[in-house]
Each structure stands twice: as C-alpha cells, then as structure tokens.
Amino acid sequence: MTKKIIPIILCGGTGSRLWPLSRSSFPKQFLEINKEESISFFQKTINRIKNYKNISNPIVICNEEHRFIVAEQLRKINIKPEAILLEPVGKNTAPAITVACFKVIENHLDPCLLVLPADHIIGDINTFMKVVDKALDEVKKGKLITFGITPTKPETGFGYIESENELDTNKLKGEQIVNFIEKPDLEKAKKLVRDKRFVWNSGIFFFKAEVFLQELIKYKENIYKLCKKSYFSSTLDLDFQRIEVNSFSLCEDISIDKAIMEKTNLGIVYPLKAGWNDIGSWQSMWEVSHKDKLGNSIIGKVITNNVKNSYLRSENRLIVALGIEETIVVETIDAVLIAKNDQTQAVKNIVKKLEIDKRPEANIHKTIYRPWGNYSSISEGKNWQVKKIIVEQGESLSLQLHNHRSEHWVVVSGKALIEIEGKKKLLNKNESAYIPLGSKHRLSNPGDSRLILIEVQSGDYFGEDDIIRFQDKYGR
C-alpha cells in the first residue's frame, strides 16, 4: 500500500532581509516573486507539489496575523487545505511541526510528512520530486530525512550539513548525518565547499509523524507535552484552527535541527541539485530574477543609463539610476533601500534599529489585508489620514463605531452599500458619504465587481484599536 504524503507548509518568519518590501505584517513568503508571474513564494511552494502522486491537501501553519492572507492566496490557486493552524506566538520550527504532527495523526494512519518552508524557490521541480520519491523508501523505514543543497559558492548566509560519506547527486543516495554547522565565516565556508561531504541546509524535511514524535519524546519531552496540550485544547474559528496560547507559549524557541536532527541517529541527508534558493537577501533575489543584457533586473517604473548588474524595483514612484553597478534599489510608498549587492545581508540590522527606534516602517506594511479585502495608507498628517479601501465582491466590513475619528467615503469604482445608524444607502461611482464620530456604521460590496473607495479620516487618533465591533461575519 502506497503511503499518503501530507505537505506541511511553514509560513512563519518575517523575511527582514527583504525589507522594505517584506515586513512582519506582510512577509516575503506572501510577496509576488516578480511582476510577470503574479504568484507568491507561498503559492509557488504549494503548486510545486500539488500534482505529485499520493500527495494530500496541505496543512499550513502560520501566524494569526497572516491568516486572511493565507486563506486568500490559497483561494486564488484553488487549493483547499486540510487545515490552517494558527500559532499564537512564534516558537521556531520544532513546536510548529509538532502541532502539525498531532493534526495529521488525528486524521491519517501512519502518515508521512513533507515539511516545506513557504519562501523558497526550486527551479527544477522534476529533479526535486525524483529525490523526494527516492527518499520515501528511507522514510518508510523510519528515517528522518533532510535535503542538502549542493553548494555553488562559499555561502556565509546558510547553515551546512556534514554527511558520513561524500554526496553524489547523480546516484540520489542518502547518507548518514554527522553534524549540523551554523552559518560559517567566509574562510570556513571556502573549506566546506571543497569537501563533498558538506551541503547547504535546505530546511526541507521528510519523515513519518510517529517517528518524529518518538524522537521528540526522547530529546525534547517538554515540547511534546506542551504541544500536545495546546493542540488538543485548540479551537476552530471559521476555516482556521487556533492553537491554545498558554501551553504553546511555554515551549522552547528552537528549530527542528537543534531539537532533534542534531541529536538523533535516524538522520539521513539526500543531495539536492535542483536550482534551490531561499531568497535570503536582495542579492539572491537579483540572482534568480530575469536580467537584461547588462545584468540588470528591472521591475516597475525605472529609467537607467550606464547601469550594470543591479536590481532596481519600483512599487510606486519613478526610479532614475545613472552610472551605478552592483547596486540594489527598492522603492516602496514609505521607504527606499539603496545598498551594494554584497551588503544586503546587513538589512536585517537596519530593521532591528528601526524597531528599537519604534519606527512603524520596520514592521507595518502600507497595505493591510483583511478577510473582506485590503486597505492601503496613502497619506497622513497630524489630524488626518487618507486610505484606499478595496472590498471584494459580496464581502462586508463589521458593524462598528469609532470614538476618536470621523470618516468620509468616496466611491471610485464599483458599488457600496453603506449603513449608518441603521439607515442604508447605495452609493455608485463618484458618490460619497460622511460617517460622524461615534456613529454605528458598516460598509458592504453588493456588486459583481471589486469596490474601491477613498477614505478620509479626521480626528485625534487613528489606531486600529479604535474599532468597537457589534457584528462581524468573520468572528473577530
């Protein structure tokens, strides 16, 4: 009997090295890889495996803040997940995978789990699936499999795995794991890439759920107990399953590598040479992007003259670049990054400084996603703020009021059904409505296309916590 393979998609992480495009409110796994494909890293991860034999619908593990982004991106690629598990707090990969194991053994007999980070690129899907297929034999024997990427250069941004014998991508044969090595300095990385026993750590894993849990009990029993308690105390919320916070928050913040793979004698590494990249920096984004004859990757409104080997990305305003080489320029509505290619790993340090300084640009994306659509901050002053609001067909915001601001809505596309203090009115394009401070109100889209409107807020406070909800179809 052929075993079912359950994909476990890990959607944690903030992707701070890809700031300012990636932020904790909208991290890199949900970004479009490029303007041509209109598909995110997360969606591509799922599409990569959906046609593999014996594959089940995925289980997605994500931050509660990102649940509606996940649900919407799954809907757009017509994937119905087996579950969307909501982590109440990020505790790294070991606890996340553990609650996924409890989920799958509830519904499947002796399942195999293929654990995939949501933010990687794999260029050669056929080779990847051949290696997975080959590794399945070892999984059935109770081994814990990881996949090691054949190094192409001395990389300091990745961890390494040392195997007992040399790894050969042509033979597709796994080897016993000897050691996991943290991100090395350049001199050590140069030594490692000359030895075929060392590969990059991909963060992709493959094993039986029961085997993983047995090893977890052996090496990290407290995580097992806390995750079991938090999972079986979880609650359902629409299409989401909320992991109980009190027990889960007591878990050690630890990766699967440190919790189990560095300790177990069941670890096997398979070599993988399939165009893998974890897009851990803007330089790696440039490496995988389409380039012109001068080596430039250009996205958005960009004009160049005498520019070489650079990545230039405009999300809103025009970028004009003259006489630069090996440079990253990324423009968003509220921040611009300019960096030499070899300095992009340091972006995360800038984000940390922004967080220390309590700058909203550190984490808050200008476009915020909600179950009904999204809104974008356009401009703001001391006592006013302007937003663009998009409400999807058939959706509606909660019945709510604000104590610190009034609002003025102007419809620019579609139809809006507004309710103010129990009175309803239909607005068409170019029509507007005023919502006084303290008025109970709701906005809905009754039309057959997207509703787009401009909202002008005026008052003394504009935080999202100035929302008192009375009715909400999304259970918030």
Image (spheres, helix red, strand yellow):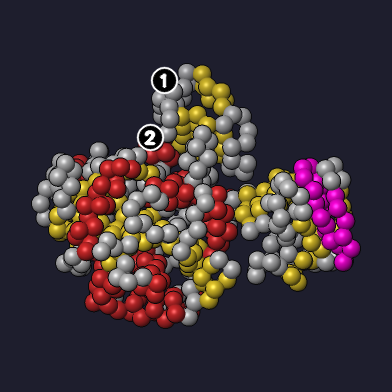
Which label number is shown at residue 173?
none
Q: Earlier in the sequence, mark 2 or mark 1?
A: 2
Q: In this view of the protein, which residue sits in the foreground, 390 or 294?
A: 390
Residue in the picture at 38% in, 49% down: 51
Residue in the picture at 46% in, 50% down: 42
- Look at the numbered disc 2 and give the secondary structure of its residue: helix
Residue of label 2: 287
Tell me if I can see residue 249 in this picture.
yes
Q: In this view of the protein, which residue sits in the foreground, 170 or 360?
A: 170
Image-quadrant location for residue 294: top left
Q: Is residue 454 above or below residue 209?
A: above
Tell me if I can see residue 363 in this picture.
no
- Look at the numbered disc 1 and give the secondary structure of its residue: loop
Tell me how many marks there are: 2
Spot occupied by residue 403 in the image (x, y as percentages of width and height): 80, 67
Q: Is residue 135 above or below residue 89?
A: above
Residue 416 among those drawn in magenta: yes
Q: Is residue 80 above or below residue 307?
A: below
- Left or right, 390 with reference to 306: right
Q: Which residues are magenta?
A: 406-427
Spot occupied by residue 25 in the image (x, y as percentages of width and height): 56, 55
Residue of label 1: 293
Residue in the picture at 55% in, 57% down: 71
